[in-house]
Image (cartoon, helix red, strand yellow):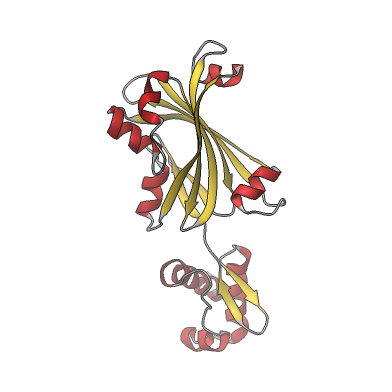
Amino acid sequence: MPVYLDIATQLDNDVRNKYQAGDYLPSESQLALRFNVNRHTVRRAIDELVATGMVQRHQGKGNMVLRQPHDYYLHAGAHFTGNLLEQGSLPRSEVLQARVIIANSKIAERLNKPAESKVIHIRTFRKIDGIPRTVIDHYLSDTTWWVVLKYFNTGSLHQFINKELNIELQRKNTRLRAQMPTNEDCRLLQINSNIPILKIKTTNVIKGTNIVAEYSSSNTRSDVIELVMEH
């Protein structure tokens, strides 16, 4: 392995484990002394970090560490809150809207319900460490849950369902694609119109059964999340 790539690997590990977003790396001269190489080699190593979005060069100031995306694992037991707490982040969720609606044909089909059936719709807005991350539309098939779910206002919806209804939901399938944000996406997620969002559609069943309990559709900032698919 070329020396500059070996240095880049070590700096990558430093950034992930020793620095916070907004911190600056030591100067190129200091790094050259640390690794016993010339500044040109250090510069090539830092080029690798710039190319992968780990750091950003600021003329006259140095190399600033950028905020890194959080891993989000896509597997049957994946949950937004649990995923992020395990990574040391502080997720927050609030309810923007909660109601019983008449499902359109698309939503009814996802929930295995007849067309124009009543379903529960809850829209949640989620942040990571105070930064807007995603807006999720949850559609739940069993309207008898409404007497309980109408009191949900913050935190993890799935944890609330588990605690209050003694029902555990499990991911059955996930579909995702990239798309450009709408004006509403830009306003809620505080992004520019040129930053793509991830459209993530998920079907959840009651654990241990094939009963579809929830269909959700989320618009997620692509710059603060990195999807990890386990095999």
Residue 180: in sight, yes or no? no
Image: 60 above or below 44: below
Task: Please state the horizontal and vertical placement of residue 124, each as a whole percent of the image.
Answer: 49, 40
Image: 162 above or below 102: below
Q: Nearer the viewer, residue 38 or 177?
A: 177
Q: Nearer the viewer, residue 226 or 52?
A: 226
Left or right: 213 as drawn, with respect to 96: left
Image: 93 above or below 119: below
Q: Nearer the viewer, residue 75 or 90?
A: 90
Q: Residue at x 55, y 85 (%)?
A: 27
Q: Residue at x 46, y 44 (%)?
A: 94
Residue 176: in sight, yes or no? yes
Image: 114 above or below 147: above
Task: Please state the horizontal and vertical placement of residue 209, each as a whole percent of the image.
Answer: 34, 20
Task: Please state the horizontal and vertical placement of residue 101, each as a whole percent of the image.
Answer: 53, 22
Residue 5 figure quarter: bottom right
Task: Please state the horizontal and vertical placement of residue 213, each as a whole percent of the image.
Answer: 42, 23
